[in-house]
Image: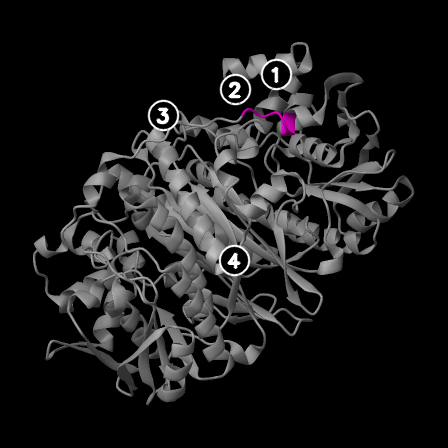
Amino acid sequence: MGLNDSEYQLITELLGRSPSYTELGMFAVMWSEHCGYKYSRPVLARFKKYKEAIEGSGLENAGVVSIGDGFGITMKIESHNHPSYVEPYQGAATGVGGIIRDILTMGARPIALLNSLRFGPLEDGSAPDDVVRKNRYLFEHVVEGIAGYGNCVGVPTVGGEVNFHVNYSGNPLVNAMCVGILRMDEVTTAAASGIGNSVIYLGSSTGRDGIHGATFASESFGEDSDAKRPNVQIGDPFAEKQLIEATLEALATGAVVAIQDMGAAGLTCSTIEMASQGGVGMSVNLDLVPIRESDMTGYEMMLSESQERMLAITKPERAHEVINVFKKWGIHAMVIGEVTSDGIVTVTRSGEVIACVDPTLLTDHCPVYHSEQTVPDYFTKAEHFDPSSLPSVDSHSALLQLLSSPDITSKRYVFQQYDQQVQTQTVQKAGDADAATIFPSGSSKGFSVKVDGNSRWTKQHPRRGGQLAVVEAARNVACTGAKPVAVTDGLNFGNPQQPHVYWQFAQAVEGIAEASEILETPVISGNVSFYNESELGEIPPTPIIGMLGILDAPGDAIGMCPKVGESLVLLSTHNSYSSHVGLGASSFLSVLHGMEDGYPEAPDLEGEKNLCALLHELAKRRIISSAHDVSDGGIAVSLAEMVIASNRGMSVTLKSETQLFAELPGNVIVATTNVDSLTEIASEFNIQSMVIGSVEQMAKLSIEVNQSTISWTSDQLNLAYEGTFERLLNS
């Protein structure tokens, strides 16, 4: 059950007796790290919005941001890492289904999906043959699971990222993000209320899949991982589509007082949390719950994580309205209990009381642990990295190697499997711009959304890695013309009981909090996933940032494809770079030299805020036609990506060869026909601007450095950039 002796002792003290078997299981899942956040809660208090939520004044499930016209956007990211290793297709699919329901229970219509994926290397020789084969299997089937569920459920998968590292081999990361739209005056609650109100079970039947899924997600992998297969839920996207429509229709009746997804911990989580948040009790008769197998015990029913299920509270006289809506859609809907005044959740099965607990004992009394923090040796050593000691490389072949490396190469193999256009609201999809852009019907406003994170940067310098994840995600949505406004985060780390892991976690959260505060993009929701390790080792620290940006009008949206005759201008913050000159923790260092050393450059947070504001203003005034930020692989990779995306040529002059591949934050390449106006406005925002080249008809890339010109044809760039995954998977 994942409880230790002291936690069991605390349970007996809180109850004043020994728990029943079902009660013990309920405590176990609610006190797991996945549900109880017992190691992460002290650190997460650094986020202002999270602190408000745990103190009772925040929103449940996911935060909401107003975009005007009476509409709001809600978003959240969740991990499904362990299930995706054991059963990649269903693990990934049910991760998508679960995050959709989190958004749905806010009263929002899900309108966009994104994902952030991490796997072990796919190249022959990068790891033992059996490990590489398993990595390829996981990669293929996770992508298929996301596509299979998302495409069928009718929500477009509009963006994401995929990265690779040897330490993900035993523990891939599958983070799913969903965005929804709702009327600001129709935000729902998960807090049960109204003594005598009906408790209604909605959705698919309860089965034995997913039992103890929350505790499974809160422990490390071992040799018995395959034995955990029953912990993985089975998804049904068609049932989810019906559930979405039925739920939104039921909410429109006004009969629903409160509603919550049966996600992690299933019926236990929904009954306990709804009662606790509302300060009420609840009586539940499990004999009324639809089940797939007639011999299921009450323990199994309370802990099952079967998919596509919700719990709702209505007034007794209006319960039939909700039930009729769901039955019209062919979905189970039945009253299984009522809200009580005694403050106790009472669960019966076959006429016997199998659980009788104060819900606040499970939600408010989870023990909190403060782990020791230790700075790892590699971090101290990395400070002394000297890029001048690196052997010289041929810049022409170096760019081609970087473009074909799995972290940088085209992700077309992945995103071509996703339906990006369903609902017909996607304006800019994967590959067209630095972020996806959507204009929901019924609103004059639109939004841009992106997920970002770099574990290489975060491992080498966790605090900077947290900052860089936020500013790059903000930069990406700003490169579409949007104003960054809010963050959801997915925090993936190893075992928090290891002092160096807890230090990585605390430092990364500090970096995220610092950047979010200065950029005025609050963390409105998120997820923590610990114990991401196996016998092959722990994962690199991997914080993922989902960023939301607002667009005032469809004409404000821009992509990354410049036009012939335009000037290319490099916009830069006033950074003071270190002696690592952007090569520390870089793709250049990893791909060309097989090294992970040095620190990533620290971002100028105030400068990044100004840069995002400038990009928003330039797009709004129609002064720039396109923008693309400088990130993995440096300015050479960014220019190559623009050439490939636009099928246009670029002639550029740079100051030094180091600048080609340096990963320097606060840099964006924009295209314009009005350099004078751009320069004037950039200076008002305290941003440097420099004309570095022009856009030409013939599709090729020419870069002059130190009076020497390096050129690549579009065929060379495309050959390197496209088809990497097909080659690796078929090798």
Q: Determine whether label 1 and label 2 are within 8 Å by CB.
A: yes
Question: Which callout, 3 or 2, points to the residue nearer the camera?
Answer: 2
The CA distance from mark 1 to mark 3 is 30 Å
Q: Tell me: 441 left or right of 636.
A: right
Neighbourhood count class around disc 2 (C-alpha, 10 Å): few under 14, some 14–19, many 20 upward: some
Image location (x, y in percent) of residue 480: 46, 71
Identify the residue shown where x is 50% and y is 22%.
Answer: 2
Residue 537: which quarter of the image?
top left
Residue labelled with disc 2 = 3
Q: Tell me: 132 left or right of 525.
A: left
Query: Mark 1 belongs to which amino acid?
Result: Ile
**In this orientation, does residue 213 appear?**
no
Image: magenta residue range: 362-367
The CA distance from mark 1 to mark 4 is 39 Å
- Residue 681 bears which disc, if any? none
Note whether 454 is above or below 212 in the view shown.
below
Q: Helix, strand or loop at disc 4?
A: loop
